[in-house]
Structure formats: structure tokens, C-alpha cells
Image (cartoon, coloured by chain):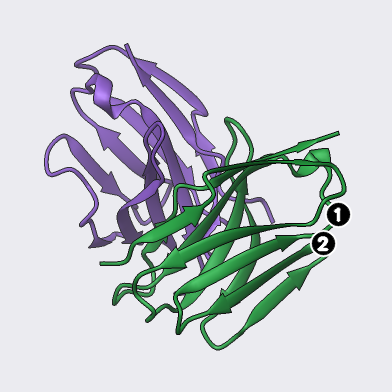
Chain colours: A purple, B green
Amino acid sequence: NAGVMQNPRHLVRRRGQEARLRCSPMKGHSHVYWYRQLPEEGLKFMVYLQKENIIDESGMPKERFSAEFPKEGPSILRIQQVVRGDSAAYFCASSPGSDEQYFGPGTRLTVT
Amino acid sequence: KQEVTQIPAALSVPEGENLVLNCSFTDSAIYNLQWFRQDPGKGLTSLLLIQSSQREQTSGRLNASLDKSSGRSTLYIAASQPGDSATYLCAALSGGSNYKLTFGKGTLLTVNP
């Protein structure tokens, strides 16, 4: 059973561009979570999704950030018009239910 | 609002030493507490998960304890090795939700050969 997969592993964007981060949960897992780790900071919860539903997006910035988990395909975290402050490691986790979360390797976003 | 604190922020020990990493949390109404390892530039590896009804969990040279009443957890590493060098994170699942992990900032451990 493959683990949680994230791509790309590294992403460089210029200010103003869009960043799309993908997360494929473990097989059989229908719950996906996104966390962000800013430099010198701990991981912070961003959003919790189940198939086709956003359950809790209380940790997401109100503007420019959106997330989806469609019926088919990976979960996508989209950041529009990126700024330097968006540079961080973005981690995705999945779980089969309300249980232990399994983390992916992360996507490291650098905004130049 | 749950807050998780880890002390110390960094720790350097000689190989072979036993050591303890500390984690404290403000809201004792947790569902579980999890310890992770993070290597530089890498993802998170789950080490141990302690359910709220448990007092401790063991895996190999690692032992994690949980005291909900005092809001504390410790990770004990026996006979440390240079390969144990990494950042260790603790995370509490709580806050009225059973899905939102609150992380500490981690302890950076260096084991010197």
C-alpha cells in the first residue's frame, strides 16, 4: 500500500503566479488534511476535506487559497497570486476516518 | 484553543546516552497525542501514537508517556545513536475536533558519535 503521495516535491513560482499542489491519499482513505510549515514555525492546520466536501477550512487564509478533493483524482491546494510569504512546506495527510493521520513528504514552495 | 510547547528547542548529546524530550499541552481534552520525527527537508514519520485512555506506548528504543491531568507527554529515547539526529515533533488531536492536529515547534536533536 503506497503512502500518501504529494507532487511536486519542490515548486518555484514568481510573485503573482499560481501554485497548484497535489495530494493523493493512501488507498482506502477518504479524509485529507493540509498543513503548512512556515520557516521556524510549527506545522499549522489549514483545511480538512472529505470527498467532494470541505469540512473545515478555518486554517486557510481567506484570500488566494482554495482546496478541493474531487470524487476522482487527487486533492488540490491552490494558491493564486503567490507572494513571498507563501514560501513554506505544505504537507498533506490522510486517514481512513477519525483516526491516525499519515503524512506525505510535503511540497516545498519557493516564491521568488 | 490548544497550544503545544516542546522543551528544549534543541538538544545535543553524546552517542549512547538516554534522553527525554518534553511536550506540554494546554487543553487536556485530547483524543490522542502523536510523536513524529522530521529529517531536514523531509516529511513526517510517525513514531508513536498514544490514545487518551493510554498511559504509554513503546516501540523499540522509544517510549512515550502521556499524563492528561498535567498536560504533559515525554518521549524517552534509550541508547541514542547518530541516526536518531532529527527534529522531533509532538502533536495533540483535540480542541473539540477529532481531526485537527496541533503541533509543537519541535526539538532538534543532535547525537554526536
Numbered label attached to residue B79? 1
Question: Residue at coordinates 37% horizontally, 35% vertically from top-left?
Answer: A38
Numbered label attached to residue B61? 2
Spot occupied by residue A57 in the image (x, y as percentages of width and height)? 22, 56
Question: Residue at coordinates 57% horizontally, 30% vertically from top-left?
Answer: B41
B96 lies left or right of B79: left
- Is residue A97 in view? no
Q: Chain of mark 1?
A: B
- Asked whether A42 or B67 is in front, the reply is B67
Q: How many marks?
A: 2
In the figure, B19 relative to B24: above or below? above
Spot occupied by residue A31 in the image (x, y as percentages of width and height)? 42, 63
**SS at badge 1:** loop
As measured in the structure, the alpha-carbon distance from the residue carrying label 1 to the one carrying label 2 is 7 Å
Binning the other alpha carbons within 10 Å of mark 1 as few (below 14), some (14 to 19) or many (20 upward) gives some
B73 lies left or right of B112: left
Question: Do tag 1 and tag 2 residues touch (Cβ < 8 Å)?
Answer: yes
Q: Check the picture and name the quadrant holding the C terminus of chain B.
A: top right
